[in-house]
Amino acid sequence: MDMILELDDYRVYYKTLSGYVKAVDGVNLSVAEHEIIGLIGESGCGKSTLALSLALPKPPMKIMGGKANFLGIDLTRIPWKKRREILLSKLSIIPQYALDSLPVIKKIRDFLRDIARDKGVDEEKVFERFKERINFIGLPREVIDMYPIELSGGMRQRVVIALATLFSPALLIADEPTSALDVTTQRHVLELFSELRDNNIVGSIIFVTHDIASVRQIADKLAVMYAGKVVEYGDLEEVIREPLHPYTRGLIKAVPTLGINYKKKRLKGLAGSPPSLLNPPPGCRFAPRCPYAREECRINDPPTIVLDGYRTVKCWLYTRR
């Protein structure tokens, strides 16, 4: 299977007066053609930084090293002009808080004109493509002459999706695209992402979320991030059914499910808090919260262990398998 994106020891830090915040610190991850990967983890784990750095790295964010091979282009080395060329056309992003990404003083038509000018494409072609896209996602054509403030939250989210997929990108990055929506609208938006992939409107998708229930509806693979690192990766159902990393197990145990009598069985949260990424602890970054941690875990960073083909886990517990 051809790879769309391959990250190798990918590192993205934030420069502060106190030093570097190691938000993404040595990530290895691959996205195959026509694949949806779910990227989950607690707030502050680095998943949104990872997503944004691939498309729009801006200060104080700084790519510190590693490689990000996207369709033969190393995203860590390309100049801003080249990055602008591939944005929307090959690589597109639906940013976090996408509902607020459309200024209220512009009609949707004005956004389309801006895109046409930036890409050097005829305006009418862009308008027609947008109309085709909103017809596919179930919006009336009238939205093209409306202001964002006139649209509901679900409609605005779908407009952003339509804008992000105008040029059928090879990779779409969606950062928390359902977090501000009610559950009914969330379901429609999740179905839409699958339809976009299945109808070849987009190639592959990285779906960033903290919600395991949402990502389970659409993803093929699951990558779990903790404190700037991917600690587990594999087939989504396999990871959820048999989580290997203690952090993944804790995440899944904290998710409420239907049919459970909570008077008899209580949800279990993860004890403690994530470490500071300004001064992360030595060794495994989950060790201070891990019930299985031993001395080696507190001293040395665990290697990434490959199990059964592409299933990986970053934990000392599996080094002797």
Image: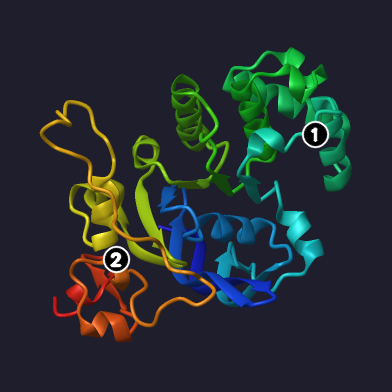
Residue 186 sits above or below residue 63 on the image: above
Locate residue 246: give its quadrant: bottom left
Residue 275 locus on image (x, y percent): 43, 68
Of circles 1 and 2, which is in front?
2
Q: What residue appears at the point 23 percent right and 77 percent down from the top-left corner? A: 316
Task: Indicate the secondary structure of the residue bearing disc 2.
Answer: helix
Disc 1 residue type (three-letter) = Pro
Kindly identify which numbered label has been placed on residue 289: 2
Q: Amino acid at mark 2?
A: Arg
> Which of these two is toward me, 209 or 115?
209
Question: SS for tag 1?
Answer: loop
Q: Which quadrant: the C terminus?
A: bottom left
Residue drawn at x 35%, y 46% is 220
Q: Residues within 10 Å of mark 1 (few under 14, many from 20)?
A: few
Residue 13: give x, y in percent of width and height. Answer: 60, 72
Residue at the outermost left position:
264
Judge the density around disc 2: few (<14), some (14-19), many (≥20) Cα neighbours within 10 Å.
some
For the point 78% across and 64% down, the residue is 80
Relative horizontal placement of residue 268, taking residue 138 as reference (left or right): left
Q: Position of residue 267 (x, y in %)?
A: 22, 41
| Quadrant of the image occupied by residue 21 | bottom right
Q: How is the image coloured?
A: rainbow
Q: Which residue is mark 1?
A: 103
Q: Quadrant of the N terminus?
A: bottom left
How many numbered markers are drawn?
A: 2
- Relative horizontal placement of residue 298, taking residue 202 as reference (left or right): left
Q: CA distance from mark 1 to mark 2?
A: 42 Å
Considering only vertical position in the picture, is 75 above or below 92? below
